[in-house]
Amino acid sequence: MSLRRRRVAVVFRLAIVISVLAGIVLTAIGPTTVTGLLPYFTIQSNVAVGLFAGYAAWRAWRDQPEPPSALKGAVTLYITITGVVYHLVLANPASPFAMPQPDRTLPDALGNQFLHTVVPLLAVADWALFDPRGRLRPRYAAWWLAFPLGYLGFALVRGLVVDRYPYPFIDAGELGYAGVAVSAVFFAAAFWLLGLLFVAVDRTLGRRARAAHPVAAQHAAGAPATPSTAPTTAVARSDATALP
């Protein structure tokens, strides 16, 4: 990565970190406390992408290789899930799982947009612009489901204790465990397909990059240089015979 590109990457990733912090702080100013926010997938995914962006910014600043693409794909997928589920499911009046949207104070409204819109967009843009291409594999889409499924288990166990569930589509009190199971299968399939979309985009961009810069792609793969040294040797011999 060139010096200019590294600097842009650092600035971009610091913007992600600042947006995460702003979203959490502004949201916590409202009626919800920080500890009350922690059980939500929104907060957990934002914290994950904020920490990862800070780590990636530090590596870029020190001119070190990018973090593993599989890990970056995972956190990018999770924050994308946050944005997609909020806008298409929770804040969509046509959705069967729409949550009532309260009259928010200005800080709360800004925090909500940071967490559900600004950070997901910045994270996806960072992944598209700066992550090395062609490293994701289709099997990763299944591996990436581990955290959402683990979160489901956490939310259900917590619900048994406090009799409260963070999202209506995993509310066992309202849907029953059979209803939650149906909902979980649907969302898991949707998240798996979304992960496959990330892999497909990564591989497509990788093929385009290799086609546009074949020599750089060969060097990145460790291929030997293609030009032969024979002409140089011939010239050297010709020069030698011309000497007195």
Image (tube, rainbow, N blue to C red):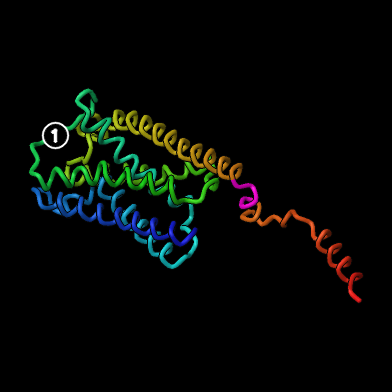
Region of the chain picked out in magenta, as a range: 213-217
Q: Is residue 237 above or below residue 109?
A: below
**Residue 214 lies in the magenta stretch:** yes
Horizontal side of 34 relative to 89 (left or right) equals left
Which is nearer the eye, 20 or 38? 20
What residue lies at 41% left-to-right and 65% top-to-bottom?
A: 61
Q: Is residue 66 above or below residue 62?
A: above
**Residue 149 rendering spot, x and y as whole percentages:** 37, 42
Horizontal side of 79 relative to 23 (left or right) equals right
Quarter assignment of residue 58: bottom left
**Residue 54 rendering spot, x and y as whole percentages:** 34, 60
Residue furthest to the front: 244
Q: Main secondary structure of the magenta part?
A: helix
Q: Quick check: can you spot residue 153?
A: no
Q: Amino acid at mark 1?
A: Gln
**Residue 48 rendering spot, x and y as whole percentages:** 33, 53
Q: Quick check: can you spot residue 178?
A: yes
In the rendered image, the quadrant that contains the C terminus is: bottom right
Which is nearer the eye, 192 or 124? 124
Which is nearer the eye, 194 or 228? 228
Horizontal side of 23 relative to 193 (left or right) equals left
Which is nearer the eye, 5 or 86? 5
Horizontal side of 240 relative to 27 (left or right) equals right
Question: Regarding mark 1 in the picture, which secondary structure is present there?
Answer: loop
Residue of label 1: 101
What residue lies at 10% left-to-right and 36% top-to-bottom?
A: 102
**Residue 97 lies in the magenta stretch:** no
Label 1 Cα neighbours within 10 Å, binned few <14 / some 14-19 / many ≥20: few
